[in-house]
Image (cartoon, rainbow, N blue to C red):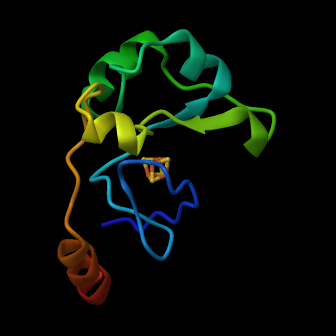
Amino acid sequence: MQHIHCTVSNCYYWDKGNVCLAKEILVTSDEVGARYPDSLDATNMMEVAEEIGSISASSCMATCCKTFVDKSAAQRETKKAPVPKISRQQYEQSKSTGM
Ligand code: SF4
């Protein structure tokens, strides 16, 4: 399993120690992120690959995490979090086993 460090604390997938508990994430360019709806995410990578393919970015400032879901919106269930979230325990286990 990958270990993703993230400081965006109002994201539904964020957890203490600046870790991301999303099972998978989609990072793309700001331009693609703005062009496609929130429903386009890591869970539909076949569609992403067909529609977008791969894209270059000029710097880190031109990239975004498409998997971000505002925590308060997810808690109010006004916005769906499409990617499965792992538990902190699963995260710790995968860290210790390297899987
Ligand atoms: S989904 Fe993206 S924004 Fe949210 S915690 Fe993970 S890396 Fe950060």
Residue 88 coordinates in the image, percent (x, y): 25, 73
Residue 23 coordinates in the image, percent (x, y): 27, 53
Please state if 28 lies on the left or on the right of 80 as rendered. right
Can you say which quadrant of the picture contains the N terminus? bottom left
Vertical relation: 43 (above or below) 95: above
Residue 9 coordinates in the image, percent (x, y): 51, 57
Vertical relation: 4 (above or below) 83: below
Vertical relation: 52 (above or below) 86: above
| Number of numbered tags placed on the structure image | 0
Vertical relation: 26 (above or below) 24: above
- Residue lying farthest right? 58
Q: Residue at x 42, y 10 (%)?
A: 51
Q: Image quarter for residue 68?
A: top left
Q: Residue at x 48, y 20 (%)?
A: 53
Q: Image quarter for residue 7?
A: bottom right
Judging depth in this view, the residue of 99 and 4 nearest the camera is 4
Q: Residue at x 30, y 27 (%)?
A: 79
Can you say which quadrant of the picture contains the C terminus? bottom left
Q: Residue at x 40, y 37 (%)?
A: 69
Judging depth in this view, the residue of 36 and 87 nearest the camera is 87
Residue 56 coordinates in the image, percent (x, y): 68, 29
